[in-house]
Amino acid sequence: MHDLVITGGRVVDPASGTDAPLDLAVDGGSITALGPGPTGRTVLDASGCLVLPGFVDLHSHAQSLDGQRMQALDGVTTALDLEAGAYGVARAYADAAAEGRHLHHGFSASWASVRMQVLAGVVPDGRVETLVGQLGNAAFQREATRREEDALVAGIEAELAEGGLGVGVIVGYSPGCHPREYVRVAALAAAANVPAFTHARDLVDFTPDTRIDGAEEIVRAAAETGAHMHYCHVNSTSLHAVDRVHALVAAARREGSVVTTEAYPYGAGMTGIGAAFLAPDRLAERGLAPASIVVAATGERVAGAARLTELRAHDPTALVVVHFLDEDVPADADVLRRALLFEDTCVASDAMPLSWNGPAQPGAWPLPPEALNHPRSAGTFARAYDLLVRRGPLGVAEFVRRAAVLPAQVVADATGGAVRKGSLATGADADVVVLDPATYRDRATYDASNLPSTGVRHLVVAGTPVVRDGAVLLDSRPGRAVRR
Ligand SMILES: [Zn+2]
């Protein structure tokens, strides 16, 4: 008699090459048997469903219970904030432990957080909202002195010592950062044997006077330092230059560098309104206008440059949806498809914290209409499945490789192989998504961003159901800290 058995589904596990109708047994948080007919104290019916390793999201800023509920219904069992990183690693893990988490979670050491302390005197409080509010801080955006660089490197090393999963480097938000500083941070990651996760600097295609091309900077750092460089959301930072970026990454890989990539299937981004590239006089670089920007909490479409200046000054913590590409325009939609289909690209959501139109209602579930977000926070994996499998060229196994196996390899790299996800082999962690391929779909849109995906029948995290028969079990919090 096993703890839990998932019966009647089609098990697809690219890591072991399995694709067959099998029952799956779980004991003590691990997969203990695959085969017909095991019996269990808890039985989850998977008939008509795919039984897959739970998706591993390398890029989730939605480090909260409500954010994780949305991601659970999208098929995610591990959600990590590796791009921005923790605004204080010890604090972020402690806060998650105190409240409990539905999903496995973890953080990188945050270059931005340390840079805000060293250059701008901002004290970290563990909250991503605070980090967002400082993106427009001129002191954070400027070049560091050599002495400040030294302090920055020491600060990141201290954060790694707290268990950070690599170094998150959102250098794209700090246009004044000297390229030397970036290489030093990459060298630090190489020395610590962890990846660096980069939100790339501006590309020369849009910003000819950038200090260095954002894509060149990443691949050069990989070659010069030997670090594993992970290139975050290639879709949103490359836009129509995506093929040039892919060519650079492919060449770097051929030469032996470790450069991994990720993408999400939406034409719009989301960020803090204070971001350097959203300055009114810089919008044209990316073909944007003030009306390309929508304030998440209120739905206000920014009317003009004067209003944008006013909003940036008065509420720098505001999150905004930035409409870069139009998914209804075929040439734009094709950029997203190419980004997601590029060789060995991970699906990663860039899920965001909620914005509230009115007072926050923590714990409210289902999310009320006042809880607003970017649809990627709810629908990235289901939407990628629709685009790549249902309407695209990939088989289920290749999709699972991109949604679970490849990101799990990045996590293994970040933990010296100690944390191994993305497999359903006997002995693997029992992180499992059971989804109905006929009904697995994203529902969130820019106008209705709080609708979770449909089709995830069950979600098992460390052997414990978090979603059962399509409903989130609100008190089930088996998520563990992923840390070094
Ligand atoms: Zn980013």
Image (spheres, grey):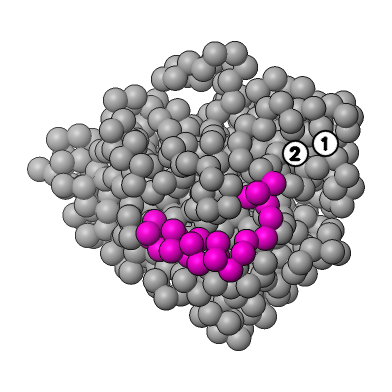
Q: Is residue 151 magenta?
A: yes
* Image x and y of residue 97, in percent: 29, 38
Q: Which residue is mark 1?
A: 292
- Label 1, label 2: how far apart the Cα atoms are: 6 Å
CB under 8 Å between discs 1 and 2: yes
- How packed is label 1: few (under 14 Cα within 10 Å), some, or many (20 or more)? some
Q: Residue at x 70, y 39 (%)?
A: 274
- Quick one: SS at disc 1? helix
Mark 2: give few (<14), some (14-19) or many (20+) Cα within 10 Å: many
Residue 185 left/right relative to 203 = left
Indicate yes or no whether the magenta region holds residue 164. Answer: no
Question: Residue at image x 44%, y 58%?
Answer: 155
Q: Position of residue 13 (x, y in %)?
A: 39, 59
Amino acid of disc 2? Val
Which quadrant of the rendered structure holds the N terminus? top left
Q: Quick check: 470 above or below 27?
A: above
x, y percentage for residue 234? 67, 58
Labels 1 and 2: the sequence-earlier one: 1
Name the amino acid, label 1: Ser
* Residue 441 shown left or right of residue 405 in the figure: right
- Report if the beta carbon of the residue with label 2 is closer than 8 angstroms to ligand 1: no
Depth check: 402 or 435 in front? Answer: 402
Which region shows up in magenta? 138-160
Residue 209, image x and y in percent? 84, 64
- Name the residue that disc number 2 marks: 322
For the C terminus, the image quarter is bottom left
